[in-house]
Image: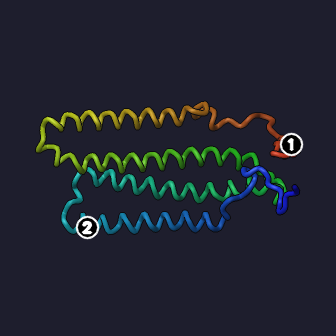
Amino acid sequence: MTQSGPQKGDPTLEIWIGERSLYIFIVFLTVFGSVILIPTAYIRWRHERLREPEVSFIVLAYIFFLANELVLLGLQTRVYRLSYVALRMKPPYREILNDRHDVIILAYASTYLFYSALWCIKISLLLFFRPFLRALPDQLRWWNVTITYLFITFVLGFLATLLSCGGPRQLNHVAPGQSRLTFPKAFPLDIY
């Protein structure tokens, strides 16, 4: 039985979402996050609730979120340039090694920023419920245990991510004399 249609290749060698579509999606997420936060900030201001402790973590989460979106926009162009070269859609270029290194650094930065934004939201929710728990003194002790556990897991998670691939020293390391790249079809390219 013969197979009709195109031959299926390695799915990792395909671009699943277009560069423009991903750019639009990142901008949409930024606008969507702002549309949610700005009215929330207005409501808190209107009811004079801006001095509560969870507000600082909400603002910090928003700052981390915006920084993450900016990093994603910078990461996106480099990833697509490298993908086009790997798929032989464009020829290799001089800065390819720098782009590979920058992609790793930006991916780590994006991970840390997103991770920090999520943890800030989690901590702000715990701080939001603390006044309710003051009425239950026996339960407030468990709340304190929970918040302590969260801070410890945040720090350990951050360190585990940072040290997972050799730590900061390895992130800044580009092998000396690294001038040959091998692509999936095993053809070496000389980059000068």
Amino acid under label 1?
A: Ala
Quick one: SS at disc 1? loop
Where is residue 96 shown, x and y percent of the image? 76, 50
Q: How many marks?
A: 2
Left/right placement of residue 28 relative to residue 37 reads right
Q: Residue at x 86, y 42 (%)?
A: 186
Residue 171 seen in this snapshot: yes
Q: Relative to 131, say whether 29 is above or below.
A: below
Task: Kindly identify which residue carries mark 2.
Answer: 43
Q: Relative to 71, say whether 139 is above or below.
A: above
Q: Which mark is residue 133?
A: none
Where is residue 189 shown, x and y percent of the image? 87, 46
Where is residue 38 shown, x and y percent of the image? 35, 67
Q: Which mark is residue 186?
A: 1
Left/right placement of residue 178 relative to residue 34 reads right
Where is residue 20 shown, x and y percent of the image? 65, 68
Characterize the local packing of mark 2: few (<14), some (14-19) or many (20 or more) Cα atoms within 10 angstroms: few
Name the mark nearer the viewer: 1 or 2. 1
Quick one: SS at disc 2? helix
Q: Earlier in the sequence, mark 1 or mark 2?
A: 2
